[in-house]
Amino acid sequence: MRYLLGTIKNIFFWRYARNTWQWDVLCVLILAFIFLTPKSWFESGERQLSQAHPKRVSTLLIGPEAVANEEDKEKLRQHVRDLTGRPETEVLTVRKVVDGAGKTRGYEVDIR
C-alpha cells in the first residue's frame, strides 16, 4: 500500500528524472490524451452555455459606411440582423466611435 501511494505521489508531482522510462510513459499518456480525446468533449460545454443565456448582451463594431446616420435605427437594426443571421436580434444602444479629428470611424452597437 505504501509503495502504491508513493508511486501515485511521484506521478502527481512528476518526480521522475527526464531520462527514465517513467518519464516516457507519462509523456506518452499526455500525448494520447491530447490526440485521442473526442472533440465533442470540449465543444458541448460552450453550446450549452450559449443556450442557457440567450439574452446575453454583445457589442458589435460596425463601419461608418454601413449606416449613414446613427439615428436611423431601422436601417441599423436590419444591418445587424443581416450580420448576425438572427432575425430576432434587438438593438439596445448605439455609440458613435470618432477619431482624434472628429471623423466618424464606426458605431458600437449593443445587441441582445
Image: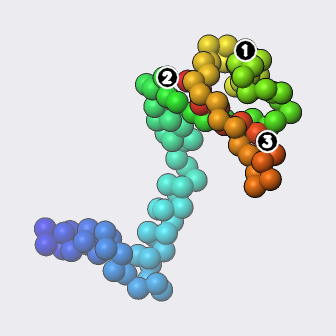
Which numbered circle lies on residue 104? 3
Q: Are marks 2 and 1 in contact (CB under 8 Å)?
A: no
**Image position of 39 with respect to 76: above or below:** below
Disc 3 residue type (three-letter): Thr
Instruction: Report the mark closest to the observer, 2 or 1.
Output: 1
Q: Are marks 1 and 3 in contact (CB under 8 Å)?
A: no
Rendered location of residue 91, percent (x, y): 62, 22
Which sits earlier in the primary sequence, circle 2 or circle 1?
2
Which sits earlier in the primary sequence, circle 2 or circle 3?
2
Asked whether, in this view, residue 105 is left or right of residue 58, the answer is right
The residue where tag 2 is placed is 54
Q: Residues within 10 Å of mark 1 (few under 14, many from 20)?
A: few
Q: Residues within 10 Å of mark 2 (few under 14, many from 20)?
A: few
Q: CA distance from mark 2 to mark 3?
A: 31 Å
Disc 2 residue type (three-letter): Pro
Residue at (52%, 30%) from the top-left corner? Answer: 57
Q: Are marks 2 and 3 in contact (CB under 8 Å)?
A: no
Which sits earlier in the primary sequence, circle 1 or circle 3?
1
The residue where tag 1 is placed is 74
| Closer-to-camera residue (108/102) | 102
Rendered location of residue 70, percent (x, y): 73, 27
**Image position of 20 with respect to 56: above or below:** below
| Closer-to-camera residue (7/47) | 47
| Res 98 visible | yes
Residue at (83%, 27%) from the top-left corner? Answer: 68
Location of residue 64 by image quarter? top right
In which quadrant is the N terminus drawn?
A: bottom left
Asked whether, in this view, residue 69 is left or right of residue 26, the answer is right
Q: CA distance from mark 2 to mark 1?
A: 22 Å
Asked whether, in this view, residue 2 is left or right of residue 104, the answer is left
Rendered location of residue 41, percent (x, y): 49, 39
